Amino acid sequence: MAYTININYFNTFLLENDEETWYIEESRIKGGYNETSVDLGVKAYTTNEDYKETRRGNALTYSGIYNSRTGVNETNYFSPAENTTKALTDIDGTIQKLYAEDTNLIVFQEDKVSRILADKDAIYSAEGGGTVTSSQAVLGQTVPYAGKYGISNNPESFAIFGTRKYFTDKNRGLVLRLSQDGITPISDYGMRDYFKDHLRTSSALHGMYDTHSQNYVLSMHGSWGDDDSSYKTVTYDEIVKGWTSFHSYKPTFGESLNNKFYTVHKQNLWEHYANSVTRNWFYKEREESNEEVISPSYVEFVANGNPSAMKTFNSINYEGTAGWSMESNITSASDKSFAVPKNGTTYTDWDGSTKEIGFIKKDDKYFSYLKNNSTSKKGEIIFGGQTSGIKGFFTTVKIKCEGSEARGAMELFKVSHDVVTSAR
């Protein structure tokens, strides 16, 4: 049997006409201006039945505070009555990377890098006293860094050490460093054209910092294939302000921990610089012959002393450990020499005697004469292997260590030529 219950308070009113009926929660009777107010004051709220997902790639949204000490957890609280969003200019593209540093939040967009002043008390404090309400701007003023640079769509290129942040801008063909003096294009240090060509064709750009060698490591994976040969891995050194090495390993992620450098390849974690493993053996599996696949070490450089004078390069010598060979030596005049094998290489002469070729050790240094391996030029009477030395303004030399020697600790301190300036 139904019956009626009288209550002392209500604030919901029924309004209807010939077509529709509304149930309205209101603090004033009939919702009229200056009508009698209900006893408990304003309790009205509204809902949005037409809600839908909205993607704002250039905006930040933050929730309520979280404090594990007091048990306050408002990470699922987004009040529309409070200013909980921070929008950046949409002309600079979407936000790709956020990094919190001290009292700033560094924001990396596709075409711009900015820092936002953050009020940490408003984020972490839950002791009351009006701290949150008096700090309405959790994310404060946006201060852009000078220059039209961004991180494009490659947040995986980001790496940090100390106050220096490294990343790439594929859209502009640059590798950048963000430090106390602003943004600097470090790809301009001798590698401008190289990065403009290779960043453009890369499908992924993995950046990491090696604290053991104090280098920023960038691995550019090619879009032309997924095999291990489609990549270029290079390192940047702050001490010399330049790109020092190419590497034969292909990481997809890397991180330093306790002065050790780790990289990930094919879901496996690898430790670098370990003394218990073979050197120059990166991510390699054993072949069917059960032999280790060793990547060679090589140094390629230009010898350019007194560049305005035509010279004859008679010999080559180096200081370091045994096992290095000269793979190529070409001059500006297109003269080239025969390769020079490593120290201790021998051959059998026509009379059956054994003779030593390659680098010869003398006074703890290794040297070898250069035998000409060029084609004849107009006016030349003697050329090729009958002559020693190669002529030109400068030489391009490639010194390499491979095989069993590449497994050990190889050192190369200095490479030089015995040079004679040509008479005019």
Image (cartoon, rainbow, N blue to C red):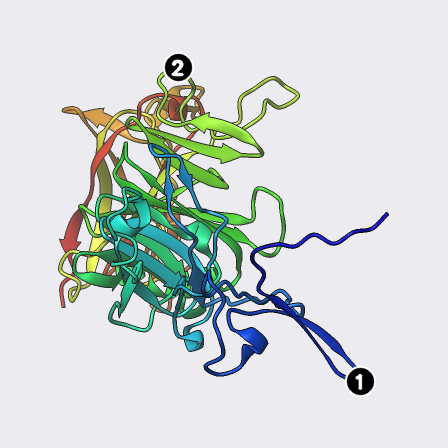
Pointer 1 or 2: first along the chain: 1
Q: Position of residue 272 (x, y in %)?
A: 39, 27
Q: Identify the secondary structure beneath mark 2.
A: loop
Residue extending furthest toward the right: 1
Q: Nearer the viewer, residue 48 or 189?
A: 48
Q: Amino acid at mark 1?
A: Asp
Secondary structure at numbered mark 1:
loop
Question: Is 130 situated above or below 192?
Answer: above
Image point 64% across, 67% down: which residue?
51
| Relative horizontal placement of residue 229, taking residue 199 as reference (left or right) | right
The foreground one among 23 and 406 is 23
Q: Nearer the viewer, mark 1 or mark 2?
A: 1
Question: Which residue is the extreme one toward the top?
Answer: 276
Q: Position of residue 203 (x, y in %)?
A: 55, 56
- Circle 1 is placed at which residue position? 18
Residue tagged 2 = 276
Q: Residue at x 57, y 55 (%)?
A: 8
Q: Quadrant of the C terminus?
A: bottom left
Q: Residue at x 51, y 69 (%)?
A: 27
The answer to whether residue 391 is visible is: no
